[in-house]
Amino acid sequence: MMIRIRFHGRGGHGIKTASRIAGTAASMEGFNVQDFPLYGAERRGAPLTAYTRISDGTIFERGIISSPDIVIIADDSLIEDPMADPLNGADTNTIIIINTNRPHDISEGLAARGRVFLIDATEISMSVIGKGSAISAAMGAAACRVTGLINKATVEKAVVKELTSIGISSEEIIRKNVEVAGTCFDSLPSFEIITRAETSQLLTKTIVLPYEAPAISTPNVIASGNIIERKTGKWRTFRPVINYDKCNHCWICFVWCPDGVISLDDKEFPHIDYDHCKGCLICYEECPIKAITVERESSSNEQ
Amino acid sequence: MESDTKYKRLKDLSREEFILPGTTVCGGCGGLEALRLFHKVLGKNVVFVNAAGCFTLLALFPYSPFRGSWLYTNMASAPAGAQGVRDALDILIASGRLKPEDDMKVVVLAGDGSTYDMALSSTSGAIFRDLDFYYFCYDNEAYGNTGMQMSSASPYGSMTTTSKPAHLSTAGTRSHKKDIFEIWRAHKPPYIATISPRHPVDLSEKVSRSMQYKGPKLFIAFSPCPTGWMYDPSLTVKIARLAVDTGIWALKEAINGEVKHTYIPSKFKPVEEYLMTQGRFNHLFYPVRQDKILEDIREDINSYWEQYKK
Ligand SMILES: Cc1ncc(C[n+]2csc(CCOP(=O)(O)OP(=O)(O)O)c2C)c(N)n1
Ligand code: SF4
Ligand code: SF4
Ligand code: SF4
């Protein structure tokens, strides 16, 4: 028996910790486990993946999981992100759990894909912890639940262990995370998962790369500022919104936006480029007269 | 200080952007905030020579956020790379293949791991040769790109992934931050400054003032790092301000060796206010308060400012 779980999130969601919570909980239940993250060359807000394998025998399989039994998606904006491609390799047996606050938009297109479950872990975290950005306990607990192998009490122990190990020392924060984990655990059904055959990833041929002149074989960009093609707007969980009735065009948000996505118009009013705003909320924090408010990202505020 | 530059208030900053958005560095990155403000003063004609670190992610093949040019080097040799670029530009100008007005400013862009540790030797060489360049160090006080390992810029009492607090070492980082400003000053370059993104006018004045000097011009930018310092990204500017207001980050410059503080808070805030904003100092307060370590930190700040009191 082997269960392969793939977690998709953005840097800052705590997806690596979620995969560890699932691994630790399964290990506490007496299973052999593997868990590991895969980072690209990117940072907080950018898509990343983590993996957990759970087995009652020795695990010989290595490397990334390409045919997952369970896919956990910590942010619905990842579904359409080609860099994340969270549904890759999922089939009709795959259990797909999506953290979202827009159930209608999501389930329509996905119903045929597999067994899809939606939870609003961000909302659960916000109501219990007061913050909705790091959701490792919620996502880890969701994964544990659907395996059908792990007890709620064990998940709670694993949450305490893993959050302590990443340096969270406030007992209150840990207790609240345990509560979030419990709520997410209870909101999902459990399954019996049918083990798939091991996938062989052995290559039989060596790939020979021919010599190319340095002008071709070295990365050389002859362009100016073409990074603007990359839209980092999907990184946001929350969006800053400027109230132009209040704004006194003091320039503060413009000066302190690290990414330079706020521009000023002729009357010195600031405008946010939502295709690129990463949602750090420095502008919200710094606006001296609170002319900027924060909204949770949802389909209704997408333009 | 009396302003000899055009920067007197926020609205004197340039509205033009030189680093375009879409980069892969973290949301709320204090280093990017400082670099963006720095670049506004330098203008468009810049070649960055970038030591490996978080900021090599700014240019991610096949994309570049820069309107000028960018070259990647390994961690130890960005100043040597800068020498090569400067020489090449000089030769192009001397042989008439580049108009003098199209000349570019050569800027080393490096993290603290590179600046304080690995590239110290090549930096020393470049200053010694009086290379005409700018050096911009975004100091996030650890090796950020590889997961926040301790560097010699990591402050005493901070937790990094290679200096975790433990029973025998409650401070986390036991060593004290290297004084790179004084190391540079001993080399006698014409211009050195510390800057902070929270003080954009001070920052712009300094960059602008430095431009009149030929030779090495060195900047150390205080660079709050939400990911590595463990705080909410929205607090970057607040934390930068607290660093200055508690006296932990001194804003100063040295023109031809003479040190001048450009901003001195009239009353220093208690350093706890700064430390408590960041998870990397959590162990100084929970589960028990580490009074001795906090006292050491206060003592460090006091003895720093003591030497400048007349
Ligand atoms: C000589 C050398 N050793 C190690 C590395 C691996 N490496 C790449 S980035 C990095 C961290 C750099 O830290 P720092 O200079 O502080 O910049 P930051 O990552 O914080 O931006 C390391 C160790 C390297 N590129 N070159
Ligand atoms: S949240 Fe505000 S400060 Fe942050 S990237 Fe967006 S506009 Fe800029
Ligand atoms: S900081 Fe607030 S008041 Fe100032 S320009 Fe921005 S939105 Fe307007
Ligand atoms: S790890 Fe820190 S310094 Fe590096 S990009 Fe992220 S916020 Fe900036």
Image (cartoon, rainbow, N blue to C red):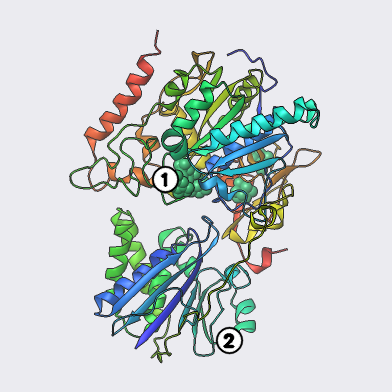
Q: Indicate left or right for A128 with B100 as reference.
A: left
Q: Could you say where residue A63 lies in the image, as x and y percent from the top left?
A: 43, 73
Q: Nearer the viewer, residue A238 or B105?
A: B105
**Residue extending furthest toward the left:** B168
- What's the residue type where badge 2 is placed? Arg
Specify few, some or many for label 2: CA neighbours under 10 Å numbering under 14, 14-19, or 20 or more.
some
Residue at horizontal 52%, vertical 55%?
Answer: A43
Q: CA distance from mark 1 to mark 2?
A: 40 Å
Q: Is residue B110 above or below residue A175?
A: above
User: Which quadrant is the C terminus of chain A positioned in?
Assistant: bottom right
Q: Give the SS element for disc 2.
A: loop
Q: Circle 2 sits on which residue?
A: A113
Asked if labels 2 and 1 touch by Cβ distance under 8 angstroms, the answer is no
Q: Could you say where residue A61 lies in the image, as x and y percent from the top left?
A: 38, 79
Q: Circle 1 sits on which residue?
A: B229
Label 1 beta carbon less than 8 Å to ligand 4? yes
- What's the residue type where badge 1 is placed? Trp
Q: Indicate left or right for A145 with B240 as reference.
A: left
Q: Return the chain for callout 1.
A: B
The disc label shown at residue A217, or none: none
Q: Is residue A297 visible?
A: yes
